[in-house]
């Protein structure tokens, strides 16, 4: 069963708005000093592409993945839409706090700064937390097993990227280990 057209439209509009903001914000970043090797990038980019294909292209999914896992109805779809809104808002807030230090891959910028304000005061990777919440919301709204699998792919990609980022941050910032001990990677008080 498809989402109600209005909820489906709202969720798609939220994701499109986020993509437009993300692309525009990417135009104003500091020059790169070091970039993660392409092989390592693939280990977090490919799972995200699989996630996008599963969530956005149901016709590519085998029937077992289009079976419902969440009951059909407006309540799960509305709850999912609210998760998408909250998750994307968190990701945007975190991106604004990063300012010109942001990059789409693990990168060290010239005059790179360790940001510990805004959501970074509680979570070391609030962009990934926000995106995971938005993806979970999308999966709930869709209500099919392909959503669950897509979120698992995204989680795997983010966990790899966190590992690479944190290794590099410990090398650059002597204070990073202290920051790491004071904050959660993705979920306050949990992980």
Image: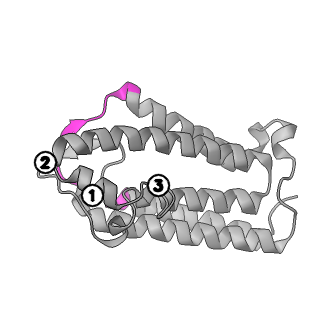
Q: Do callouts 1 and 2 mark residues in contact (Cβ within 8 Å)?
A: no
Q: Position of residue 57 (x, y in %)?
A: 71, 45
Asked whether 57 or 126 is in front, the reply is 126
Looking at marks 2 and 3 on the same chain, the residue that comes earlier in the sequence is marked by 2
Query: Where is residue 78 shown, x and y percent of the image?
Result: 73, 74
- Secondary element under disc 1, as helix, strand or loop, is helix
Q: Residue at x 28, y 62 (%)?
A: 98
Apparent side of residue 187 relative to residue 22 in the rendered image (left or right): right
The answer to whether residue 113 is above or below residue 38 is below
Q: Which residues are magenta?
A: 23-39
Dot 3: few (<14), some (14–19), or many (≥20) neighbours within 10 Å? many
Q: Which residue is mark 2?
A: 110
Mark number for residue 35?
Answer: none
Q: How far apart are labels 3 and 1 at the CA level?
A: 18 Å
Q: Residue furthest left?
A: 111
Residue appearing at x 30%, y 34% in the figure: 36
Q: In the shown orientation, is residue 35 left or right of residue 19?
A: left
Residue to which mark 1 is pinned: 179
Q: Position of residue 75 (x, y in %)?
A: 80, 74
Image height check: is 73 above or below 113?
below
Earlier-in-chain disc, 1 versus 2: 2
Are there few (<14), some (14-19), or many (20+) residues within 10 Å of tag 1? Answer: some
Q: Nearer the viewer, residue 28 or 118?
A: 118
- Is 32 magenta? The answer is yes
Q: Residue at coordinates 71% horizontally, 72% vertically from top-left?
A: 79
- Residue 128, disc: 3
Q: Within the magenta stretch, is there residue 8?
A: no
- Alpha carbon distance from label 1 to label 2: 21 Å
Image quadrant occupied by the N terminus: bottom right
Q: Is residue 89 above or below residue 107?
A: below
Relative to residue 71, is residue 85 drawn left or right?
left
Task: Find out whether the residues at labels 3 and 1 contact each other: C-beta distance under 8 Å.
Answer: no
């Amino acid at each position: 069963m498809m989402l109600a057209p209005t909820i489906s439209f709202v969720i798609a509009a939220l994701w499109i708005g986020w993509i437009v903001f993300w692309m525009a914000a990417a135009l104003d970043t500091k020059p790169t000093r070091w970039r993660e090797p392409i092989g390592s990038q693939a280990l977090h980019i490919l799972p995200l592409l699989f996630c996008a294909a599963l969530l956005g292209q149901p016709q590519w999914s085998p029937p077992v993945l289009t079976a419902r896992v969440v009951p059909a109805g407006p309540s799960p779809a509305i709850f999912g839409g609210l998760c998408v809104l909250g998750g994307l808002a968190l990701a945007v807030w975190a991106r604004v706090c990063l300012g010109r230090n942001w990059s789409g891959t693990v990168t060290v910028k010239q005059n790179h700064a360790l940001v510990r304000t805004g959501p970074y005061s509680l979570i070391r990777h609030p962009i990934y937390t926000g995106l995971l919440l938005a993806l979970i919301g999308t999966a709930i709204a869709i209500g099919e097993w392909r959503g669950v699998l897509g979120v698992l792919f995204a989680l795997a990609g983010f966990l790899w990227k966190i590992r690479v980022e944190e290794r590099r941050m410990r090398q650059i910032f002597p204070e990073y280990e202290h920051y790491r001990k004071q904050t959660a990677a993705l979920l306050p008080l949990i992980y």
